[in-house]
Image (spheres, grey):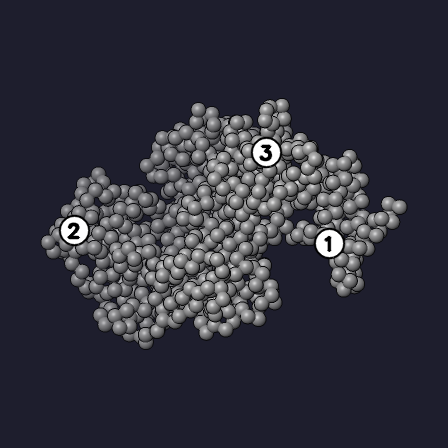
Amino acid sequence: MALGRGLATLALLTPLIATGCVAPRVDAHAAPLTFACRDHEVLHYRSLIEIFQAEHPSVVIRLASLDEITSHFPEHAAGDIGRIAQAVDAFVASAPDEGLALEGVLLDLAPYAQAGGLYPGDALFAGTVKSFARGDALYGLPHQAHAFVLYYDPAAFEEAGLSPPRLGWTRDDLLRAAVATTVRQGGVTERYGLVDRWPGYTVAALSGGDGAGTGTLDAMALADSLLWYADLVRVYGAAPDVSDPDVAEHVEALLMAERPPAMWTGHSFEAGRFRRRYGAELVPLPQAPHPAAPITVEGYMISAKTAHPEAAWQWIEFLSRQPSAAYYGGIMARRSGAYWEDLDESTAMVFRYCLEHGRPYDPQVWTPVQTALLGVLRGEALSEVLRGGPWESAGGRRDTSTRPATRGDRPVFAARAVEAPHMLPETGGVEPVTIRFGVRSGQDLDVYGHLADRFSLERSDIVVEVVGAHAEADCYIAGAEVARRSTEELVPVDGIATAWRLSRAHPRALLDPLRSQGHVWGLPLDADARMLVYNRARFDAAGMAYPTAGWSAQCLVEHALLLTDTTVDPPTYGYWPRGGATSCVGQMIAWLGGSLLAADGLPTLDSPTAVAAMQRYMDLIAAAPPEADAGATDDVALPWGHYPAPVAGGQVAMWLDDYASARHASEGNPSLGFAPLPLGAVMPRPKLERALYIHAGTAHPEACWEWLWFLGGRPEAVNLLPARSDLAANPGWRQRVGDDVAHAWVTTLERWYEAGDAWGPYSDGMTLRWVDRAFAEVLQGADPQDALGRAQAQAHVYAECMASAQGPVASWEECLRVAEEQAIEAIE
């Protein structure tokens, strides 16, 4: 049964290719390939399919959803890799775990790679190849990697009179630098020499290993590294004690301060962020006996069951030369190419080192290493914290109880012989500042009060007092309209944070409502956006998979027609037009590929593509929606948050609605699901509901900024859809709204990041109103070509009037009057 459901799912997913919902016709000699990627990567791979198929017309590639396959296909001995390989010809995914048996699951690519001069050889970095190699076999073609690196603040080293970190550093070099750059005041650490966000990775890397496998850590070397790290924390106080849960929870906040630690660990994809914020540089982690930079690798794999191995190899070899689709792009696994030419030399040198010497540390190693470290920091017996770990391999367990640095089987935090000061420098103390945060009337003061208390744990230098809407405040929460009417009372947030930081956290479509006079005047908090709402029961009854992120407007039309059945009692309907059949027709026409505007912005409402799209939409409206009740003027046009009886009663499969309206109307109905708006030629903008502002009269704009940035990343502060992309992926928010809503919103945000403002001039509702009117005529029997021709004539007059010297002066009302009068004259 599970396999049948999986195959049914795949059958509906594979047509989501570059040409639309329906698979293209292929000749008898074409090699059809199914390629699986993550839902958010569909647009990226769709564009690559077009390029590849232009060069290889004998290969037809269809996209499938990696997320759907791993959700619906049955369990496999090779885990998710095996499930995916059963379903498709090729796919992109993280490198398989070292312990998985891949023979018979994945195709051995070694013969193809050898023929192409890729493997063995110098074309690919050795560290990335290890992740896919099993003996002489190669079960994947590495594409990109993420490295775990050490960042540092050059200014901190200059102040301490130290040379900056470099390739070939040892861990004792790191200890000396961490101690020398730590700053204390009155027993309080003002700046740590090292902030380690994932100590398990660091300790594993510093413990050496030959890179041959994750289970090769030497127990004695690990014990020595654990005690070295304990000295760093306990003796010198140069790094936070992550064994304290309160400290561990707020380690990340140390990287949000105005000034960073002297050194900190992070991922390679964060290099741009830290450079812009702090002027940071990066180096690999210090060398252990063997270089072992932690990396994670992603690559392309081919199923052993594919019927077209040569075509599949051509496809993935082509992909391995293309840039990354990831929001956080990885380091390319090939040694040459445009990617490396765009990097500065110092960054390129670090990345090359990491990928050449890189080693994957899966959770089976670094998680127990982290657990062992926490135990040592808490004073637990060293032999106990090491017992049972993956380092106890075939070589037998090493005796760590006689380690010289222990007494009574307990760690002794004794200073090592390093050239570092024991008395750390003191700096002047800083009194905390108090800011007042205003909330709108009726909002829950307790929620923000709780968040203010939580914020104080991370920022003891800032006290937040939550006040009501009518009290004076340094910063406050309000609607998006404030930025359009009161900029003289606001501090522009892009004067405090960089524009790059704002744009990385929020898509342009959510920043634009707060932008004027060359500045951004607030921090977006939450938004509303249109989504595809569907009734699961209707899809289940028809044996169809639920809507996915890869759906287009054409998919919506086709499924709506298939889900309509008026012969049963009660009848079922595929689609309901929210607001009525003649509402927002222009949007649907644009989604269906109708070109309504030329490149110069002038209307082209009667273009051939617009006529064809209107006819298709007419087919949908004529067949899919429920009929209006006798005597009703339009029973499908209901107020916000309410649905007509056929929709509320479960007879309708799909409709488009704003999330807030749908959430209100569907409250308590578990049958309703949410999906991203179907893909189309254009995409409507979201509605920014609330934003966070800094009052121009505050004496502490920077403190306000830190508080508002903290708020924007908390699920409790958001009422609707979070405006910040990292919060959209937050497990707490996902749990609150459900996986389908969270996935739909994350996908929508990613589309705005990729497409910018794709809706653009289609936000001109006045131009589109003539499309709505034309469709009303079509519903009464008019020919679509004729109706759109009349609409085009009026819209053209209106557009010319608005573009003339008199247009803006005369106002849109005057131009509308001129267009209407000319239309009447044409009829007469």
Calculate the distance from the C-alpha at mark 3 to the C-alpha at mark 2: 67 Å
The one nearer the camera, 39 or 711, is 711
Q: Secondary structure at mark 3?
A: helix
Foreground label between 3 and 2? 3
The one nearer the camera, 534 or 742, is 534
Residue at image location 42% in from the left, 32% down from the top: 83
Position of residue 568 measured from the top left corner of the image (x, y, whole percent): 60, 23
Q: Marks 2 and 1: CB-CB under 8 Å?
A: no
Q: Is residue 492 visible?
A: yes
Q: Residue furthest left?
A: 408
Quadrant of residue 449 in the image? bottom left
Q: Which residue is mark 3?
A: 646
The earlier-in-sequence mark between 3 and 2 is 2
Q: Residue furthest right?
A: 828
Calculate the distance from the C-alpha at mark 3 to the C-alpha at mark 1: 43 Å
The one nearer the camera, 76 or 507, is 507
